[in-house]
Amino acid sequence: MLQKLRDKTSGWIATAVLGLLIVPFAFVGVNEYMGGGSDSTVAKVEAPPAWWHSAPHWWPLSMLWQHEEVTQEEFRAGFEQARQQQRQALGDNFDPRDFETLDNKLKVLDQLVDRKVLQLAAKRAGIQVSDAAVRKTIAEEPAFQVDGKFDPARYTQMLATQTPALTPVQFQKDQRDRLQLALIPQGIADSGFATSKELDRLIRLLGETRDITIAALPPAPADDTPVTDAQIKAWYDGHAADFKQGESVTLEYVDVDGATLANTAAPADEAALRKRYEDEKSRFMSPEQRLASHILVAVPAGADAATQKAAEQKAATLAAQARQPGADFAALAKANSDDAGSKAGGGDLSWVAHDGTMVKPFEDALFAMQAGQISDPVKTDFGYHVLQLREIRPGHGKSFEEVRDELAREQAEADGERAYNDLAGRLVNEVLKNPTALGPAAKAVGLPVQRIGPFSRATASGIAANPAVLRAAFSDALVQDGTASDPIEVGPKHSVVIRVLQHTPEQAQPLAQVRDAVIAAIRADRSAKAAEAAADAILARIAKGETLKDIATADKLQSGELPGVPRGAPMPSPEINAAVFSVQKPAAGKVTAGKARMETGAYAVFVVSKVNEGDLSKITPEERMGLQQQVMQMEGGTAVDAFVAALRKQYRITRREDQL
């Protein structure tokens, strides 16, 4: 048998088949080996190789495709940012349970995927952002300016205060990536336009008013008719989701709050503070700055030797002219510089620090000059620069006495941080000894075990309302294992360790328990239908030729005429206004009728007797220009959305909802 099998799998056909099978398995194996067999991405955007744009999605050599990934860390950061925005927008009405839905998670994920799609498109288009563009963006940022001008000291100080702190090189990279990402969508958005006829039509629509007659119907009387058992059972079965008891948990937790810890450390003495001052003296020094201007003679990347030589000679000639008595360096820069960012200002670069803001050859040359000096040509990746050093601002520092209170405060904060970290660390060590109970660990570190619950996602309060605590409390790991959590940070120097004591899954409440609620829902539905039926009956009478005014008089309804109701105004109410402008324009001599349900549940019936278009002559040129800009922005935004949607169809996008 083995010999027959060997005979059947011999020959060039079998060899070819095996070869074809080996290729994809080899790539899969290499990828698995290099990636360690784990994948923390929640989405991946892949594009075919640049040399085969039409490669099919099923092509096995996907490792040759270009790709961008959305990591779990990126998703968590994006989702938390969306959560905070929603919390700020809704205030006390914010419901963590309503936000923690798959739809919201997928919405955030799609936004991140769109960003990766644009990043990939920018890279495939070969978009590059110059150093000059990055410098210009940073220099124009108001946060880095003092008296309207870029201030290097403020720039470095602002970066140092970020969490985590950023170096100028890191920040420049972030800005370069942002500019690269924004270039294509900005170009598309700027292409939006609006014709004069479009604006005229929009002005007529936006300025439209309608003459209406309206009658308010009284609320339908409360329904008190009997509800049968069969109706109750049918409603309960058809609206089962309305009568479910939400998932709930009961927690025990240990609260480690640095604000409540007694600071037992002795105050730092003068010697310790002075030593720290000497060790960190550079913190209190502002760097030397130089007020500079330059003229750039640009050299294209990859230029030949002759082109570079010509640029160097031109720069040398400009340097010689700038050194002539009475020469105007600013005028020379305006006439000859290739740096679009500084040319109009006569080559002014404002104050420059030796901190990497400029490229190294530029900074090295500038900080080797004397005030008033004109440099020889300085070569960088952009070409040749002629530098003018106009003024030197020496660095200066604060004395120990000036910063003593700041040092003492920092020392106290450091001691408090150390005490908090020590206590939190000891608690974790004790918990690891017995992760199925918090009592022994809490007793060992002198903290109480507290209890909260039962609560659901909707009813969480106190420490449980913190999003991170709420997420952990209902996580499968804590619910199923019954073990203590890792420390959960709920604020600065404030964390909790929790353990689920009891878990009750979401479940349907028995009909007997919610019977009264079901009856109330049935009767409320009957009342709502009765109110709508009353409004429909009036609409039927209008269709047969009765006027709303006569109907209101006969039925003793509150009514009135409202001429010139403007579009979008909250009058008579937002709901009625929306309904009024949703009905068709009436034919000559006719009316168009409609109805609107109000917040009270009652209905209003109205008729539109006349439509008045917006008056073009009342729009000023400034208002027309502003409207045109808004339309162009909307058109541009729609075009960007369409562009991204088209790219998403071309690229291969994989989402891992199980990782959210």
Image (spheres, rainbow, N blue to C red):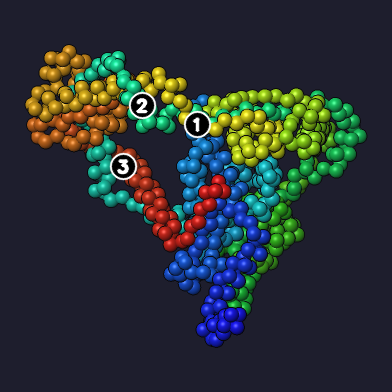
Q: Where in the figure is residue 355, as x and y percent of width and height?
A: 71, 53
| 10 left or right, relative to 390 | left
Residue lying farthest to the top in this orientation = 556
Q: Quadrant of residue 176?
A: bottom right
Q: Where in the figure is residue 212, as x and y percent of width and height?
A: 19, 26
Q: Residue at x 12, y 25 (%)?
A: 541
Q: Indicate whether 16 appears above or below 320.
A: below
Q: Quadrant of residue 211?
A: top left
Q: Earlier in the sequence, mark 2 or mark 1?
A: 2
The answer to whether mark 2 and mark 1 are in CB contact below 8 A is no
Q: Nearer the viewer, mark 3 or mark 2?
A: 2
Secondary element under disc 1, as helix, strand or loop, is strand
Q: Earlier in the sequence, mark 1 or mark 3?
A: 1
Q: Residue at x 19, y 15 (%)?
A: 557
Residue 144 is tagged as none
The answer to whether mark 3 and mark 2 are in CB contact below 8 A is no
Q: Indicate whether 159 appears above or below 409.
A: below
Residue 233 is tagged as 2
C-alpha separation, residue under disc 1 versus residue under disc 3: 58 Å
Residue 507 is tagged as 1
Which of 360/552 is in front? Answer: 552
* Number of marks in the rendered image: 3
| 491 left or right, relative to 202 | right
* Residue 66 seen in render: yes
Residue identified by numbered label 3: 624
Q: Amino acid at mark 3?
A: Arg
Badge 1: residue crowd in 10 Å (few <14, some 14–19, many ≥20): few
C-alpha separation, residue under disc 2 versus residue under disc 1: 18 Å
Secondary element under disc 2, as helix, strand or loop, is helix
Which of 46/439 is in front? Answer: 439
